[in-house]
Structure formats: structure tokens, C-alpha cells
Amino acid sequence: MSDLFLVLSQHKYIFIGEQHGKKSISEKVFSLIENLEGKIIFCVELPQEVEDLLQKFLQGKITRNFFFASPYLEDALHDHRLHSGILELYQKIYSKGGTVHCLERYEATAEESIKKKDQNMAKKFLDILHKEKANYYIIYTGHAHVMRKEQDLFGFHITPIPIYLPEEIVEEAVILQCREENGFVHCELEP
């Protein structure tokens, strides 16, 4: 077992930031979490409006193409948050007995700032925590959404999800940032 797995296995809350659009990152993430023992709740940066469709896809009731055709997924497909590699990750987690939930509010993203988007995702995450018991709660989003501190990036002021969560959750959380560089996936713990 890797040292990174050992660190992750010791935290109930795992926040993973990814560089969107890289299948190799989703494969690496699964290799790091696949041996976690117990129930996993995996929360993703997709619109809540497609959660029922996502569940039907994971249950094999609809095709990938039918799922991708949802108008609520247009932005996620455009910015590569959603692709076949990510769907494979969700399927592997689901087949392992995990639950996949969508955090984002589609209607909100069009007119609200990134600050409001992250605030809404944090609120949905807290709702999930109160409703469902698990051994591990994982947030899987783009890098900026799970940083510990506010920052200015890409011309936006980012107030990430952890800012809106109770201090005891953030203190107990581990943050892993994953990116692909020169064909290799690098996952590093954020201090």
C-alpha cells in the first residue's frame, strides 16, 4: 500500500482536486481509494438536476449517450469535468458499494459567481452528511474548489468549498490535488 493511501485511509473527509479532462487522473484516484474499507460517499462537481439520470446510468438502466444528452451536462462536457474516464470512475465506485452524489446547482451556475457555486456545493455536501452515514466522504472537483484558502485564479476570486464548511470538518479533512504533467499523474497533499 502506498503512503498516500495510508494518509487517505486515516481521514473521514477526503477532498480531491483534479485537472479536468484527464482520464489518467481518474484512474489514479481510483487506485488510491479502491481499498478504502467501508461505505464511500463520492460527491462530484455535476448538477444536482442530473443525479437521478446518473443513478439510472450507474444501474445500467440508460446508456452513456442518453446520459450525456442531458442539457444540464452541457457545461460539464464543455469544460471536460465529465468524460468517459470519469464515468468509469463513478461506475467503479458504485460497483464497490459506494454512492455518487452531484453537488452543483445548474440553474445557479449560469447567473451566480464561483463564490456562490462553491457555497452551494458546500451546503449540498452538508445535507448529504446529515442524511447518509458513511466511513468516507469524498469531494471530487476541480482544483480550485477544494483549496483551503481563498485565492485569485484565472481572473476570478475563488472562495472554495472548505471555507463554507464547519471548522471541525475542515480540520479533519485531507486535501489531495492531482494533475497530469508530461504524461505522469502527480497527486500531492495540500498542507
Image: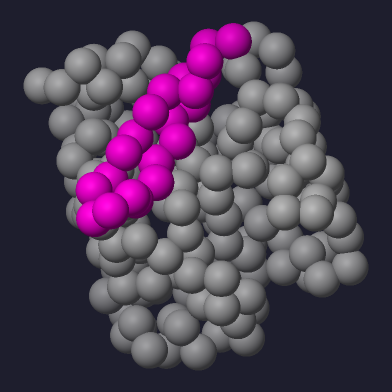
Is residue 186 highlighted in magenta?
yes
Tell whether 59 sits left or right of 53. left
Tell whether 175 sits left or right of 27. right
Q: Is residue 58 visible?
A: no
Tell whether 70 sits left or right of 84. right
Judged by its main secondary structure, the magenta piece is strand
Q: Is residue 174 visible?
A: yes
Query: Which of these two is toward me, 149 or 13?
Result: 149
In the rendered image, which quarter contains the N terminus?
Answer: top left
Expressed as whole percent of the image width and height from the top left, the position of residue 181 reads 33, 50
Expressed as whole percent of the image width and height from the top left, the position of residue 82 reads 45, 69
Q: Is residue 130 above or below residue 7?
A: below
Q: Is residue 36 above or below residue 160?
A: above
Which residue does the image show at 52% across and 77% down from the upper left? Answer: 77
Q: Quadrant of residue 168?
A: top right
Which residue does the image show at 60% across and 36% down from the upper left? Answer: 146
**What's drawn in magenta, residue-wise?**
171-191
Query: Which of these two is toward me, 71 or 40?
Result: 71
Which residue does the image show at 47% across and 59% down from the upper left? Answer: 20
Query: Which of these two is toward me, 139 or 57?
Result: 139
**Residue most toward the front?**
182
Q: Quadrant of residue 122?
A: top right
Its colouring scheme is one colour
Which residue does the image show at 26% across and 22% down from the upper left? Answer: 4
Q: Is residue 32 above or below residue 54?
A: above
Q: Is residue 174 above or below residue 27?
A: above
Expressed as whole percent of the image width and height from the top left, the position of residue 84 reads 32, 73
Expressed as whole percent of the image width and height from the top left, the position of residue 14 reads 45, 28
